[in-house]
Image: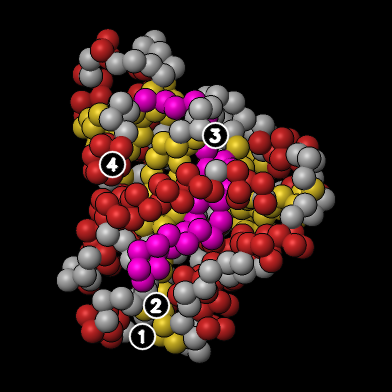
Amino acid sequence: MILIDKPYVSDFLIETIKKNNFQIISTTVAREMIQDNSLNWISGEKAKQIIKSNPKTRIYTNSENSISWIEKNLAFSNLPAHIQVFKDKIQFRELIKASYPNYFFQGVKFDELRKLNIAVIRFPIIVKPAVGFFSLAVHKVENRIDWPLVLDKIENEIGKLSDIYPKEVIDVTDFIIEEYIAGEEYAIDCYYDNSGKPIVLNILHHIFSSGDDVSDRVYSTSKEILYRHSGKIQEFLELIGIKVGLKDFPAHVEVRIDNKGKLFPIEVNPLRYGGLCTTGDLTWYAYGFNSYECFLNNIRPDWEQIFNTRGNKKYSIIVLNNNSGIRENDIAGFDYELLLKDFKKPLSLRKVDFRKYLVFGFLFIETRLGNDEELTQILTSDLRKYIMIK
């Protein structure tokens, strides 16, 4: 069963729904976004009846905007509770703190941030909304001097966010402050099968331009990336699955692994893969299998067979976030054709309304292993060469 909501649904996901005749819940928003009467539309009431009669019914959503529908209509199920424990980063940290007894984190009301006694806090730290999405209002703070400057930035950013995403997706009432872990960051798409075993569908290396960078510009996957830390990632997925009691449940998980090989959790995004149909679509271009079909049809990737033909390539998602310093109201457009000329093998380009969602779009590309020049250039770019000013 599929639940569609704003801001974006890819043609690839729509075609997947159509090809498999997956049930899709007929909400007002979904009907506005997908005007195709040939899909297997079912009413919200029928969806509730199906899930009541079979609690193991699998449901996938493309967007956390749908959380409010789930909370309102599926309160009889365990989905709202599972969603809440992951969406609230403070609650999630409390859940697993026994496994990370020395890890510092603290929940703080937004209104109390400027009153916080930072003299007792060991920097550097990360500060972000307890309920958040897409690295919005997330900042690394190096020292006490930078603290008020970062708070100024956060106040400026959240003024924009309240008009873009519902509170179930981003709620700036509460923030979490936690210690910064130096290391490499990874994003994992997975699902928990009917026995609670986590099935990994992809592992992506989240690449940053510097130690201060917390943006979502480049995510890459390859055979080496998938196998590098697969053992400890599997162990961590099993840990949270047992803690929460997850079964028949998809998730997008983010972790950081330090230079000693220890894994630290960042967040778990429930009932979906990467936001705006990014990582969920990527597996088709990268590895030739459909992540949505895997979850809804209980399919496990055969990695050995996959890498017989795809072992010497790297596949990446480029997030075209507006880091130019140019205000959205001053931008006339974005030159996507010029962007495509800077890559040897673009696979798919998704354009997004940058005035609404603060990103210009997403680009999927293929590169040869050891040839990261294209990735390095876009990683450090402010995108000004592609931006057209009014």
Say which label, 2 or 4, has the lower sequence index: 2
Say which label, 1 or 3, has the lower sequence index: 1
Q: CA distance from mark 1 to mark 3?
A: 43 Å
Discs 2/4, front: 4
Pick the quarter of the image with the N terminus.
Answer: bottom left
Q: CA distance from mark 1 to mark 4?
A: 38 Å
Say which label, 4 or 3, has the lower sequence index: 4
Residue on which disc 2 sits: 1
The answer to whether the residues at label 2 and label 4 have Cβ atoms under 8 Å apart is: no
Q: CA distance from mark 4 to mark 3?
A: 20 Å
Discs 4/3, front: 4
> Disc 3 on helix, strand or loop?
strand
Question: In the current view of this chain or complex, which residue is farthest to the left?
Answer: 76
On whether residue 38 falls in the magenta region, the answer is no
Say which label, 2 or 3, has the lower sequence index: 2
Residue on which disc 4 sits: 96
Q: Which mark is residue 42?
A: 1
Residue on which disc 3 sits: 184
Magenta: main secondary structure: strand
On whether residue 181 falls in the magenta region, the answer is yes
User: What's the magenta region?
Assistant: 179-206
Q: CA distance from mark 2 to mark 4?
A: 30 Å
Q: How is the image coloured?
A: secondary structure
